[in-house]
Image: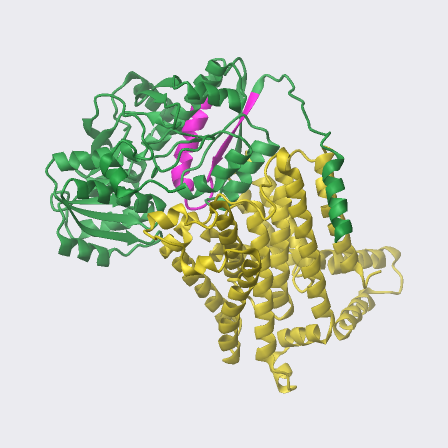
Chain colours: A green, B yellow
Amino acid sequence: MKKFMGVLTILSMVAFVGCNNESAESDTVKVGLLHSLTGSMAISEQSVRDAEVLAISEINANGGVLGKQIEYIEEDGASDPSTFATKAEKLIDSEDVATVFGCWTSSSRKAVKSIFEDYEGLLWYPVQYEGMEASDNIVYTGAAPNQQIVPAIEYLIEQGYEDFFLLGSDYVFPRTANMIINAQIEDAGLNIVGEEYAGMEQTDFAAIIAKIEAADPDVIINTLNGTGNVSFFKQISEKNYTADDYMTMSFSIAEEEVATIGADILEDHMVSWNYYQTTDTVQNNDFVAAYKDMFGANRVTSDPAEAAYDAVYLWKAAVEMAGSFEVDDVLAAIATGKVSFDAPEGIVTIDGDTQHLAKPVRIGEVKNDGLIYEIFATDAPVEPDPYLKNYNWAVEAGIQPIE
Amino acid sequence: MKKHGENISFAVIVIILALVPLLLQFGAISGGSTVIFIGKCMAYAIVAIGIDLIWGYTGILSLGHGLYFALGAYGMAMYLKLVSTNGQITDFMHIGGLKELPFIWTLFDNLPMTLLFMILIPAVVAFIIGYFIFKNRVKGVYFSIISQALTWAFYSVFIALSPYTNGNVGITEIKSLFGSVKGDANRANMFMLFYVSLIVLILVYVVAKFLVSRKFGKILVAIRDGENRTYFSGYKVSMYKTFVYVLSAIIAAIAGAIFVNFNGSITPSEMTIEASIMMVIWVAVGGRGTIIGAVIGAFVINLCEYNLSSGNLVEIWQYIIGSVFCLTILFFKGGLVGLVREQIPALIAKFKSNNTKNKITKKPTVTKLNTKKGGLNHG
């Protein structure tokens, strides 16, 4: 054994010489795209991947970044967190990419987080999520809870809703979101009349609908994800319930999901995001037109797709500010808090401390044309607060992580 | 030479694996991540050996070995997580409303206990399941269905008990037993882990080879080829089956523990039916009923996946893997090993006999092959 250890040590010591420092001056810069292109998440992640490809091709057509064309290397996460981990490692370490745009689910992000930290890579994560995280090696371009969940509940409280029913899929985002909502509602002195979780693959919602009927809430806060949404809304509409009977506020239903579930079923229900396809800005008109032009007229844009599109442009802005593709330099540029982009949703700026975006919040209502229309928006971009440190009720409820 | 072909092939694989870290040091491999991936493949090869013992040799098709793989992986991951939190409760327990470390976690707060329970828990689960199933002489497809259902049940429990298991996010952000293995600065740790895993792979191979080359192995094959005859010959078939099932569960658990060291996270997706079936596919493609086949299959399929699922093939790679599997089942029942050992020699023999147009017709060739096979079976 001792001998073996000796051999090992020698093997390890032998050659730290062969470190390859071949920073060959090429006219392209490599970036990685890491999404699920197969498996259950492929349907959702395709739109995000497409938005990133659109941004990359636009940037390339306009001269690239620091004079270099962007070359993207695509890896399939296959809807499996361990595969995401393996592929993230491959992209950063073997392919030596400048940065990675990727992930959708919280489980895939959590699986790659420590890899980006250990290899000192940089990940751009484009989806709204549950917060309670701020890695130095991840830029979060989707909403933090205080840019989606908290303002939506505030809006509902203002509108006079009093009895809330929490319904979600059984995983980390709904669980954390509901922990936040519980604290917020309790602070407002209102009532949670029920809290239910459905399995990820659950398709029968009869029992849950019965509980909703018994609890008789004013509004259902819906954090179901994926196929659960389709089954739940179909079954609730089969009982002839509309938004007048049970209003819902959803955090995971964007334009793509409306198309899957059916606009007639979702009509007049509310959602909360930072961006809709109908958002009225010049940048958005261009973005929607370019997206449809590249991927087909029947495709719709959505909040995650827009956030992914922004991510690529924000990376470009950060690289140009840093004058370098090195992760350390790019992070230093981001830390100034001055990296911003005139995005389809409005001007977004990366907060230097948390590496989340300051972004506007929009409450929307689904209409029967399958699009979502804004019914309320914040006047200015909302500063990110992933740990909800600036909310007394959140601090008092002790929802911050302990580590 | 032919008799030892399997061991020689394994020796070649071991030598190649042992050289991998050196190749990295001398720049022949582009990054440490490749070595880490090959480390994961070694874990897959170990679980494949376990599945080969139970499926290839004993003829019991288990579609639920992902469960034992994950149980071992979770055991190790819980220990490694407690190392990183200094024995304090984790974030997900906090979110789940737990105030102190749950009992099940306290079993894994030091390494000896972890190594014990990491193996003991899967072994006990496998024993309970195996004992009752095999005692009641449940066989064939019914066993496969039960093994799937069991995996599904455990999967659901792991998702539902999120304060204890972190649901479908699983246990993340952990380092290996030897510290972080990522990046150039931690190469010594990574090599350490790599060689330790290689030794475990060798040990598991040797144990499996030892078992199947003894009388025990012949009884397993006898159970596979004629269970009733074996039973009426006075062998306690259910005892043998239970033993092999428990053994393969333990091997799977060891593989899981190695995997998590390389991967740095473990999620319930490793214990899905899908993941379990993948493991069976490795064995089928490599060649079941030969230990080396399991090892080769695990490496070949995973390396293919790793390299195919990117770039231009990113959207069709699953079709490629799928067709390889279908072709194997249809035309190469013995997998890659069978191809090399039987089909190619048969082809060459056929070619020769046609070429020389001697008195040797096809018939003797076939008989020759048959006797060879028979000779193997009867030892």
Compare residues A245 and B26 and report the one nearer the observer: B26
Q: Specify whether A388 is left or right of B185.
A: left
| Residue A90 versus residue B334 in the image, above or below | above
Instruction: Please name whichever residue, A3 or B166, is drawn nearer the observer in this view of the structure.
Output: A3
* Quarter of image, res B61: bottom right
Q: How many marks?
A: 0
Q: Is residue B2 left or right of residue B35?
A: right
The residue drawn where x is 65% and y is 74% is B220
Identify whether A331 is placed above or below B317: above
> What residue is at 59 percent from the left and 49 percent from the top?
B177
**Quadrant where the image shows the N terminus of chain A:** bottom right
- Which quarter of the image is occupied by the C terminus of chain A? top left
Assess whether residue A384 is covered by the magenta stretch.
no
Residue B69's spot in the image, x, y percent?
Answer: 54, 58
**Quarter assignment of residue B356:** bottom right
Residue B251 picture location, percent across and down: 60, 62
Q: Is residue A58 visible?
A: no
**Residue B228 location in percent, x, y?**
60, 82
Instruction: State yes or no: residue A44 in magenta.
Output: yes
**Which residue: 59% across, 56% down?**
B255
Residue A289, compared with residue B9, is above or below; it is above
Q: In the image, is A349 to the left or to the right of B317?
A: left
Front residue of A73 and A381: A381
For the magenta stretch, what is the residue range?
A: A29-56
A382 over A198 or under it: above or below: above
Residue A5 seen in the figure: yes
Return the x and y of residue B187 as percentages of the image width and height: 65, 38
